[in-house]
Image (cartoon, helix red, strand yellow):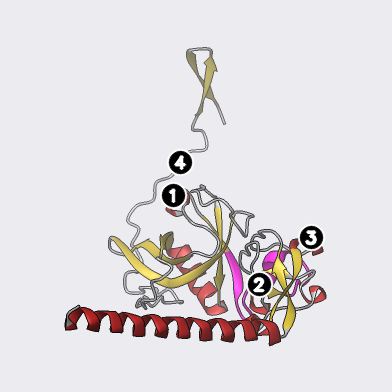
Amino acid sequence: MNNKTLLFVILSLVFGVTAVYLAQNWLKSNSQIGVSGKTGNVITMAVQVPLGAILERKHLALTSVPEAFIPKGAIQDIKDAEGKVVKQRLYAGEVLRKERLTVKGEGSTLASLITPTMRAVTIRVNDVVGVAGFLLPGNRVDIINIFKSNGLKTDVVLSNVKILAIDQRASNDENKPVVVRAVTLELSLEQAEVLMIAKSRGSLQLALRNPNDTAVIELATIDETAEVNTESAQPVEIKQVASVSNRSKQKVILLKGMKEQEIKVNN
């Protein structure tokens, strides 16, 4: 056996012993955490629940997990989750957190999903304005105003607006295009005023945004007061007035099947 072979054998033994030692230490540390670590109860989802649903006891499950793995904000009592409104879609097995729920107020569940200081405003759409039915609750859109002012013009009046609902649905479990007639948007009062002014001066078009697009778009300024051009409004001189005799005759068209008959009537 030459020196090189002997060196390889010695190195192999050293690496093997080191690997066994590290593996044993890792197993011991993990086993100690598993034995000595305390456990706690958290509320998990027993089934998938869509956005806007009201949680019931049948949707929830009590699960025991190590305290080291309990996330911040996790709900640990079923009473704290029962009767709350779901703000985002929840999946089976997911740990329920306070940020995913909101308190149900009076009226519809949609009202509970509106962010404080915001308002829900609905606009009428068609297959073109509604992006061929690809709009879903939770998507964000830019709103373009098309109007006439010495020709057709366009302005981006609102940007990165959240869609609360489509028609009467605040959630859509199927990720398929659905042509709708109305879209409900989440707007501030100032944005709602801008939208109403833009709607009154022309038509609206929604532009669907990528959910990861955070670009800030420069918005057009809309004048709230319409300017009146007084210079163009000048009196017109009347040169001749035509008089109409009271004895003029009126004509009545009488239709009989495919035939037309004209009848003159005296005043």
- Mark 4 and mark 1: span between their CA atoms? 57 Å
Disc number for residue 244 = 4
Query: Could you tell me which residue is drawn at 58 percent across and 55 percent down?
Result: 172
- Picture coordinates of residue 73, whole percent (x, y): 66, 83
Mark whose residue sits in front, 1 or 2? 2
Q: In this view, does 226 lie to the left or right of 47?
A: left
The CA span between labels 3 and 4 is 83 Å
Which residue bears the numbered disc 1? 132
Q: What stretch is highlighted in magenta?
A: 103-121
Q: In this view, does 30 lie above or below 107?
A: below
Q: In this view, does 123 lie to the left or right of 34?
A: left
In this view of the protein, can residue 9 be seen by the observer?
A: yes
| Position in image of residue 35 (x %, y %) | 69, 83
Q: Quadrant of the C terminus?
A: top right
Q: What residue type is labelled 1?
A: Ala
Q: Is residue 35 above or below residue 206?
A: below
Q: Which of marks 3 and 4 is nearer the N terminus?
A: 3
Q: At numbered mark 4, what does the secondary structure look like: helix, strand or loop? A: loop
Res. 24 mark: none
Mark 3: secondary structure: helix
The span from disc 4 to disc 2 (Cα, nearest Å) is 86 Å
Q: Amino acid under label 4?
A: Val
**Nearer-N-terminus badge (2/3):** 3
Q: Mark 3 points at which residue?
A: 58
Residue on which the image places disc 2? 95
Mark 3 and mark 1 in contact? Answer it, CB < 8 Å. Answer: no
